[in-house]
Image (cartoon, grey):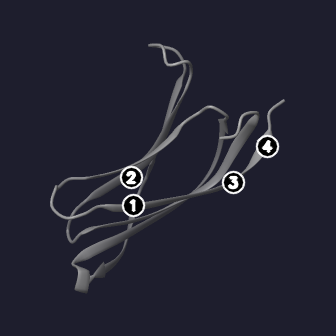
Amino acid sequence: MPVGKRLVIENVSVFARVPHSQQVLVWFQFYIGDGSIGDGTFFRQDFPLTFQIYEGSLYRDAFVASQQIRLYVDSGTRIQFFGLRKWTGGTLEVDFSISGFLVDLP
């Protein structure tokens, strides 16, 4: 995030692929504060995924999510994106897309 700016997130979309029959959980999070214990605010947003298609030739399942949201993120805040699955075999692929705009901080 550029210094002196605030990011206004309006939509988050997710596309995930996992080996067939595996479960997947995706979310993003950020923490606002100076990092000391008990200081600041923690925010986490989970995304319920919808099964999209079985890619038979690749033996994978594809999932999607899209969520309208109104979230304000100030400069200096680190946003982290996560994907988690139950099994360790194969590869988990997760693509997050966010849309929104930057505004000047007062």
Give the mark nearest the N terminus, 4 or 2: 2
Contact flag, marks 4 and 2 (Cβ < 8 Å): no
Q: Position of residue 98 (x, y in %)?
A: 59, 56
- Is the residue marked by circle 2 packed among few (<14), some (14-19), or many (20+) residues within 10 Å? many
Residue reaching furthest to the bottom? 57
- Is the residue marked by circle 4 packed among few (<14), some (14-19), or many (20+) residues within 10 Å? few
Q: Is 2 drawn above or below residue 106 in the view shown? A: below
Give the mark nearest the N terminus, 1 or 4: 1
Q: Position of residue 10 (x, y in %)?
A: 66, 53
Query: Disc 2 marks which amino acid?
Result: Val
The residue beneath circle 4 is 103
The residue beneath circle 3 is 100
Alpha carbon distance from label 3 to label 1: 20 Å
**Position of residue 93 in the picture relative to residue 73 (left or right):** left
Contact flag, marks 3 and 2 (Cβ < 8 Å): no
The residue beneath circle 1 is 94
The residue beneath circle 2 is 26
Camera-side residue: 97 or 23?
A: 97
Query: Disc 1 marks which amino acid?
Result: Val
Alpha carbon distance from label 4 to label 2: 28 Å
**Position of residue 103 in the picture relative to residue 58 (left or right):** right
In terms of secondary structure, where does tag 3 sit? Answer: strand
Alpha carbon distance from label 3 to label 2: 20 Å
Q: Is 104 drawn above or below residue 83 in the view shown? A: above
- Is the residue marked by circle 1 packed among few (<14), some (14-19), or many (20+) residues within 10 Å? some
In terms of secondary structure, where does tag 2 sit? Answer: strand
